[in-house]
């Protein structure tokens, strides 16, 4: 697999990317000719109305969906040219995903949920339990290690999900409306956690909230599958420009 130069190349580069879906006889253009670059570390918000292509954009960056045209390059790997096996490894090691509905495994404890991606990645049991414990402690969930998702609040579930997303130390964390199912206070805590994570890795977060988007280092506006002027050519995020 081609490796990434961690400093010189952007973490995400989309080149003239389009994605269309067939809905019966109709072709839906979810994304049309999107080009963008996102640099190392920092938080980028993706904002736009419902149906504008935000989730599609995130799924393409995470290798969960493939473009109809164009190239998606993440951490030096051209996602749309990977084999199935390479794609599986890419999704496991290079990206972490945070969902609006948390998507925790219901019959596993918080600790086991966070350890699971490390198990898939071949991390020995003692090491993955140690790292999962440390992550949950760091996210103020030390008293919740043995709790199952139904015994946690929404905000707690999302913090567990974020710990799970960073378990394998991905370069890129993708969060699709992570605060959408939370009250404003829990949403604020989750958002601050994502900001903290963005000091170490690149975080791309879809949000409907203008208020939350403003807290990001950069906002990408999308309408009808296209980036609005100004975001298409925006320079990669320079470390020096970021909020401390
Ligand atoms: N699997 C699919 N099959 C067919 N059409 C799809 C599929 N996924 C998305 N679309 C269509 O692509 C367009 C973009 O959808 P997308 O989910 O990316 O929007 P979104 O900005 O995330 O919207 P929301 O804010 O409601 O989540 C929409 O018209 C949607 O109906
Ligand atoms: Mg969406």
Image (cartoon, grey):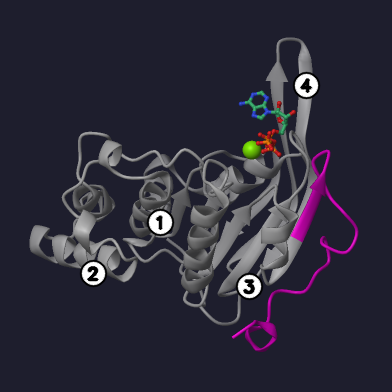
Q: Residue 106 at what x, y percent from top left?
A: 27, 34
Q: Are marks 3 and 2 in contact (CB under 8 Å)?
A: no
Q: Which residue is mark 4?
A: 27
Q: Residue 179 at what x, y percent from top left?
A: 55, 49
Q: Quadrant of ligand 1?
A: top right
Label 1 vs label 4, nearer the camera: 1
Residue extending farthest to the bottom is 240
Label 4 vs label 3, nearer the camera: 3
Mark found first going from the N terminus, 1 or 2: 2
Q: Are marks 4 and 3 in contact (CB under 8 Å)?
A: no
Q: CA distance from mark 3 to mark 1?
A: 21 Å
State whether residue 71 appears in this view.
yes
Q: Quadrant of the C terminus?
A: bottom right
Q: Which residue is mark 3?
A: 39
Q: Which residue is mark 2?
A: 134
Mark found first going from the N terminus, 3 or 1: 3
Q: Is residue 31 left or right of residue 200?
A: right
The range drawn in magenta is: 220-244
Q: Compared to 67, does 114 lie above or below?
A: below
Q: Is residue 20 left or right of residue 10?
A: right
Mark found first going from the N terminus, 4 or 3: 4
Q: Is residue 67 left or right of residue 229?
A: left
Q: Secondary structure at mark 4?
A: strand
Taking the spot 68% from the left edge, 72% from the top edge, the residue there is: 217
Residue extending farthest to the right is 229
**Residue 20's image quarter?**
top right
Q: Secondary structure at mark 1?
A: helix
Q: Quadrant of the N terminus?
A: bottom left
Q: Is residue 115 left or right of residue 231?
A: left
């Amino acid at each position: 697999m081609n490796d990434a130069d961690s400093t010189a190349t952007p973490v995400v580069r989309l080149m003239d990317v389009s994605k269309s879906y067939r809905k019966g006889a109709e072709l839906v253009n979810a994304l049309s000719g999107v080009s963008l670059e996102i640099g190392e570390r920092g938080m980028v918000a993706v904002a736009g109305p419902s149906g504008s292509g935000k989730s599609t954009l995130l799924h393409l960056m995470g290798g969960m969906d493939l473009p109809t045209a164009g190239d998606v390059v993440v951490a030096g790997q051209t996602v749309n040219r990977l084999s199935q096996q390479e794609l599986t490894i890419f999704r496991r090691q290079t990206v972490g995903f945070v969902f609006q509905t948390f998507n925790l495994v219901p019959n596993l404890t918080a600790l086991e949920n966070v350890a699971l991606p490390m198990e898939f990645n071949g991390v020995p049991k003692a090491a993955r339990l140690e790292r999962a414990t440390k992550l949950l402690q760091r996210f103020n969930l030390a008293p919740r290690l043995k709790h199952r998702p139904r015994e946690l609040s929404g905000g707690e579930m999302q913090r567990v999900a974020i710990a799970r997303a960073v378990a394998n130390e991905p370069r890129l964390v993708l969060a699709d409306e992570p605060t959408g199912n939370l009250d404003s206070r829990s949403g604020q805590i989750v958002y601050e956690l994502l900001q903290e994570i963005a000091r170490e890795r690149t975080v791309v977060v879809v949000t409907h909230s203008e208020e939350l988007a403003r807290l990001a280092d950069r906002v990408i506006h999308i309408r009808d599958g296209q980036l609005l002027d100004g975001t298409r050519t925006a320079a990669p995020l320079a470390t020096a420009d970021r909020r401390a």
